[in-house]
Image (cartoon, rainbow, N blue to C red):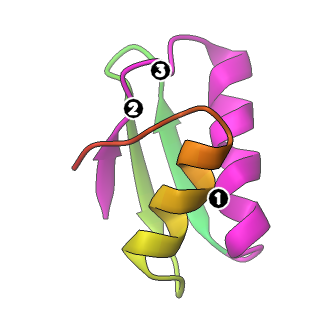
Amino acid sequence: MQLHIDNMTCGGCARSVTKAIQSVDANAEIVTDPPSRRVQITSSATQEQLEAALREAGYPPRV
């Protein structure tokens, strides 16, 4: 799935986003792109679980 995260603007943000996703699925495949503010996720977790973890970390996503 691909999500857009408006406030992921730097490498530090990308690391925080990655940690939030990995808190739900440690084996998730994650590709972050801060310039486009997009993250591509391959995970066994549901989209709802991943979105909730990102919101809790302060990075609310949009599809």
- Residue 17 in percent (x, y) is at 63, 40
Q: Which kind of residue does numbered mark 2 sit on?
A: Ile
Q: CA distance from mark 3 to mark 1?
A: 16 Å
Query: Looking at the image, is 3 positioned above or below residue 26?
Result: above
Query: Looking at the image, is 52 positioned above or below residue 48?
Result: above
- Residue 11 in percent (x, y) is at 67, 18
Relative placement, left or right, of 41 versus 26 is left
Relative placement, left or right, of 11 versus 2 is right
**Which of pointers 3 and 1 indicates the residue nearer the eye?**
1
Q: Which kind of residue does numbered mark 1 sit on?
A: Ile
Q: Earlier in the sequence, mark 2 or mark 3?
A: 2
Q: Residue at x 54, y 45 (%)?
A: 55
- Residue 36 in percent (x, y) is at 31, 21
Q: Earlier in the sequence, mark 2 or mark 1?
A: 2
Query: CB atoms at circles 2 and 1 under 8 Å apart?
Result: no
Q: Which mark is residue 5?
A: 2
Relative placement, left or right, of 33 versus 1 is right
| Residue 11 belongs to magenta span | yes
Q: Earlier in the sequence, mark 3 or mark 1?
A: 1
Q: Residue tagged by mark 1?
A: 21
Q: CA distance from mark 2 to mark 1?
A: 13 Å
Which region of the structure is painted magenta?
A: 1-27
Q: Residue at x 51, y 21 (%)?
A: 8
Q: Residue tagged by mark 3?
A: 34
Q: Quadrant of the N terminus?
A: bottom left
Query: For numbered disc 2, what is the local secondary structure?
Result: loop
